[in-house]
Each structure stands twice: as C-alpha cells, then as structure tokens.
Image (cartoon, rainbow, N blue to C red):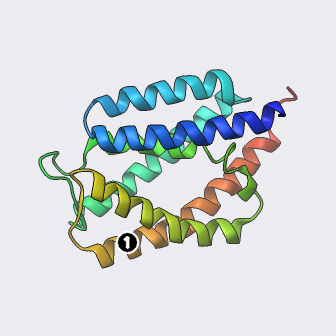
Amino acid sequence: MQAENLRKIVNALMFQIAWFGVVLAHNPWAFAIAGLFLLVHFAFIAQHPVQEALFIGVASMLGIAFDVVWFSLGWLHSGSHGIYPLWLAAMWPLFLATLHHSLSWLQGRLLLASVLGAIFAPLSYFGGAKLSPVTLTEPVWALAAISLFWAVFLPICYWQLGRVARNYSPA
C-alpha cells in the first residue's frame, strides 16, 4: 500500500475515533482527545504541517463563531455548559484535518463539496446531539441553517486549501 493511501486511511480512522471520543466525553477530556489526534496528525500525516495548522486554526475559528451563533439564537442548547459548550470547539480542528487527506478527493469538486456539506453536516450535528447533552431546540431552523452554512463553508475551505497547496514549497 502506498504511503499516501495509508495516511488517508489512518486520517479517516483517527477522525472517526476522535469524533466519537469528543462527543461521548463532552467535557474537558475532549481537548485531550483532540490534542492527541492533532499531535499524531501533524507528526505523521500532514506533509506541510505549518501551512495546514494555519488553515485549520483560521477555519476552526470561523466554524466556532457560527456554532456560537446557533447556540445564541437558541436553535441549539448545551444544558449546563453556558452559551457554547467548549468541548464542541474540539470538533472543528478534527474535521478540518481530514480535508487535505482522507477527504482530499473533494478538492476541485466545489459543487459536490457544497452538496455533501449541506447533507452530511446536519446529520453529524443531529447524531452528535443524540450522543451528547446538546439538544436541537429548533431542529428545523438549526439544521436548515447548518446545511446552508456548510453548503458555502466547505467549498470555501477547499478553495482556500487549493490556494495554500499552490504555495507549498517542494517536499
């Protein structure tokens, strides 16, 4: 098996394990899980860790900002965690670390990325809400807004990743 294919498979498996770990932990341990994932990711998976870390950091902040909007509008509720459950912030870098690896087949397919983001992101939020203290208090509005956000956000991420990749120095 080629090294690149192995990195993609490991990236996908690590993401799934970390996603369930963060959702099921839904406490400060979520950051330890995400931190371990990112440590392994940047040490063994990422070929350009500095550029990828910058992308993941900026895109995570944008995603977290929109999550805070959903909670502030009351469409999502976090129980006793205040306006926004901090453990949920750990999910963003996990997912974003898959875009250049296990989900790299979407690079350059912006319409497909938009459609898949609009379909599968709300399903992820719905599934996460079933496994954690987060509830969808306004499920129609919340899932519609999440779907619209991801229909725009995911293609922008791939567009930006393409720009970043063009600036990578030769390995």
Q: Residue sitting at 51 percent across and 65 percent down? A: 120
Q: Nearer the viewer, residue 147 or 72?
A: 147
Q: Which residue is mark 1?
A: 143
Is 27 on the left or on the right of 94, as rendered?
left
Farthest front residue in view: 1
Q: Is residue 109 left or right of residue 69?
A: right
Q: Is residue 168 visible?
A: no
Which structural element holds mark 1?
helix
Looking at the rendered image, the quarter that the N terminus falls into is top right
The number of discs equals 1
Residue 87 is left or right of residue 51, and the answer is left
- Left or right of residue 57, residue 164 in this image: right
Q: Nearer the viewer, residue 128 or 75?
A: 128
Residue 19 percent location from the top left of the image: 44, 43
Task: Give x and y (percent) for residue 96.
Answer: 56, 45
Question: Is residue 22 visible to the viewer in this orientation of the structure?
Answer: yes
Above-or-below relation of 120 to 4: below
Q: Amino acid at mark 1?
A: Leu
Give how far across and how far down residue 39 sits, in percent. 54, 23
Q: Position of residue 43 (x, y in %)?
A: 63, 21
Decide: few, some or many residues near mark 1? Use Cα within 10 Å; few <14, some 14-19, many ≥20. many
Viewer-side residue, 137 vs 58? 137
On screen, residue 170 above or below 159: above
Q: Residue furthest right?
A: 170
Residue drawn at point x = 21 percent, y = 51 percent: 133
Vertical side of 45 occupied by 129: above or below? below
The residue under the point 60% across, 72% down is 115
Quadrant housing the C terminus? top right
